[in-house]
Image (cartoon, coloured by chain):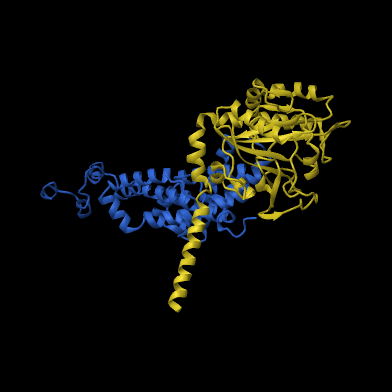
Chain colours: A blue, B yellow
């Protein structure tokens, strides 16, 4: 306790980080923004939320990290604009796929075109919003394009391999999980807990090990296999 | 008095809950399938074997597991014209991408015409259209990779019973095998809705088969129990599948030919050749439990059918 006082920590929040690995100090010395530290520390928490949704509830999503990444990006722009960006990406990917399907192009060029289309529609939306003086909507251009690029690739693969129905189910699942990740990753309690005590991340690993060996029936599978356990309709 | 009824009601509720839990415990969900069956018995590096139809056929041929006779294998675009030359005089054949899944890219040809061929459903395929399709296979249009190989096989003519179930497509028989033990089996019957494919999620009908006897005992179409095929009108349950013993033996032999402990073996019974392997799957789906009305847990414990 006394040593912390003598070390001249920069902010009162940083004092809360009296922990084994003092990441606060590190970020202060490297002059990295505090918000970046927050985001980095909250990502594993977001990933844990995704794991819970996928393996315990059974909600399909685009990839494991992606909902957490989208939620983290939405932390900067606000949830609504994150969701709006996601919708824009989805609409442009579906439209691009309709156009590209007939050309039967090879995989990598297709994805490169997809990225271009996504960039164009994000910027296009911003330009249009600016023209119409919708200042808020113009924010979609700020949404991290890297995350949107990965999203579009995943969406395209699901659409191509498993059809439009599955694609939309994955999209809906991703939206729900993004929302949950956003709520958890932006909750003050969680942020204070994780940035004050980064050791919590070890608990996250432990939780993932437990979930990784958990062989229970997923919530959605309770419905899928209802005939097998409800008993009445065992024809 | 009222206290007693409340108590009884509570016990009733609790017992029903316990009974439901008891029945749920042998149900295999995705988590349990992955940990206890797939990861425990199949090494990840061996998954690609199951996905490669040509490699599988070679492994099966080595130990004499019956497969449909191969007409040609094309390893790239440069072989497309040679294959077309070979097929010029053929009346019927089947073209498959070696690594396709879900029946994508499979073309069945039943008849030679002046300008090309005709499928069993009556669609005309000109020579240039087949060339285009073969080229697309080599470009990997039907697989997850950037390129693929072409497999041309003789066309299977299903045994009479399967033909009666559905004459316009191939019914396939799936047997789930774990370390030399057949666990569950079903026949997937195509419908008009499934576009002639037997996949359940595309609208095919699942028919449960008793592994011990080869007798069909239950059929499910779109989640509903049915007795007859809603389109062909054929009785689906209470039928004994032809050459059942041979089918199980062929499935076990196929399983022993590959380094996988848990797999789904897809078989078709040809009226000339008997059972032949269509393909194998290293991660067979769980819907078979719903079709059979029997969980993988019960099948593993070797419990008799209810």
Q: Is residue A101 above or below residue A88?
A: above
Q: Residue furthest right?
A: B114
In the rendered image of this protein, does residue B255 appear above or below residue A214?
above
Q: Is residue A116 left or right of residue B74?
A: left
In this rendering, the answer to whether B239 lies above or below A83 is above
Which quadrant holds residue A29?
Answer: top left
Would you say A206 lies left or right of A156 here? Answer: left
> Is residue B1 visible in this depiction of the protein?
yes
Q: Is residue A40 above or below residue B126?
A: below
Which quarter of the figure is the N terminus of chain B placed in?
bottom left
A170 or A27: nearer the viewer? A170
Who's the residue at 82% across and 38% down the image? B120
Residue A43: % across, % down: 37, 47
- A28 vs A166, nearest the viewer: A166
Side of B60 relative to A138 (left or right):
right
> Total marks drawn?
0
Instruction: Tell which of A226 and A129 is nearer to you.
Output: A226
Q: Is residue A156 left or right of residue B128?
A: left
In the rendered image, residue B99, in percent from the top left (x then y), is placed at: 63, 31
- Indicate the position of residue B103 as horizontal and vertical percent values: 68, 38
Residue B262 placement (x, y as % from top left): 55, 35
Report which quarter residue B211 is drawn in.
top right
Whether residue A139 appears in this view of the structure is no
Residue at image location 69% in from the left, 50% down from the top: B218
């Amino acid at each position: 306790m006394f040593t912390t006082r003598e070390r001249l920590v920069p902010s009162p929040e940083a004092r809360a980080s009296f922990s084994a690995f003092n990441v606060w100090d590190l970020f202060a010395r490297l002059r990295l923004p505090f918000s970046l530290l927050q985001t980095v520390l909250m990502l594993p928490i977001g990933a844990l939320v995704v794991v819970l949704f996928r393996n315990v509830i059974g909600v399909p999503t685009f990839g494991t990290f992606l909902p957490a990444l989208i939620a983290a990006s939405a932390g900067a722009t606000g949830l609504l604009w994150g969701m709006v960006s996601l919708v824009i990406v989805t609409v442009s990917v579906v439209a691009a796929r309709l156009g590209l399907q007939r050309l039967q192009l090879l995989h990598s060029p297709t994805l490169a075109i997809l990225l271009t289309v996504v960039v164009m529609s994000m910027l296009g939306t911003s330009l249009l919003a600016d023209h119409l003086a919708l200042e808020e909507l113009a924010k979609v251009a700020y949404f991290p394009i890297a995350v949107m690029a990965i999203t579009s690739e995943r969406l395209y693969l699901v659409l191509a391999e498993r059809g439009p129905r599955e694609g939309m189910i994955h999209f809906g699942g991703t939206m729900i999980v993004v929302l949950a990740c956003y709520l958890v990753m932006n909750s003050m309690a969680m942020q204070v807990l994780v940035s004050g005590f980064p050791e919590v991340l070890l608990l996250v690993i432990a939780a993932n090990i437990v979930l990784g060996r958990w062989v229970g029936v997923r919530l959605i599978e309770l419905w899928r296999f209802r005939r097998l356990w409800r008993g009445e309709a065992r024809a | 008095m009222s206290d007693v009824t409340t108590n009884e009601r509570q016990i009733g509720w609790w017992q029903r809950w316990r009974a439901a839990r008891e029945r749920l415990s042998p149900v295999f969900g995705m988590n349990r399938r992955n940990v206890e069956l797939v990861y425990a018995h199949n090494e990840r590096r061996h998954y690609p074997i199951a996905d490669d139809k040509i490699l599988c056929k070679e492994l099966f041929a080595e130990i004499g597991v019956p497969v449909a006779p191969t007409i040609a294998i094309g390893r790239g675009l440069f072989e497309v014209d040679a294959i077309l030359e070979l097929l010029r005089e053929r009346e019927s054949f089947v073209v498959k991408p070696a690594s396709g899944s879900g029946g994508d890219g499979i073309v069945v040809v039943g008849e030679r015409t002046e300008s090309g061929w005709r499928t069993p459903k009556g669609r005309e395929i000109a020579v240039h259209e087949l060339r285009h399709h073969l080229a697309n296979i080599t470009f990997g249009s039907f697989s997850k990779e950037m390129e693929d190989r072409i497999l041309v096989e003789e066309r299977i003519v299903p045994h009479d019973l399967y033909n009666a179930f559905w004459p316009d497509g191939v019914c396939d028989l799936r047997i789930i095998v774990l370390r030399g033990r057949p666990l569950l089996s079903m026949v997937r019957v195509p419908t008009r809705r499934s576009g002639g494919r037997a996949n359940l999620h595309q609208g095919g009908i699942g028919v449960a088969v008793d592994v011990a006897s080869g007798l069909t005992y239950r059929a499910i179409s779109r989640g509903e129990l049915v007795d007859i095929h809603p389109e062909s009108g054929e009785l689906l349950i209470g039928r004994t599948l032809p050459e059942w013993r041979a089918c199980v033996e062929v499935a076990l032999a196929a399983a022993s030919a590959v380094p996988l402990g848990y797999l789904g073996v897809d078989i078709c019974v040809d009226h000339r050749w008997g059972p032949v392997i269509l393909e194998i799957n290293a991660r067979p789906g769980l819907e078979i439990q719903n079709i059979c009305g029997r969980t993988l847990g019960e099948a593993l414990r070797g419990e008799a059918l209810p």
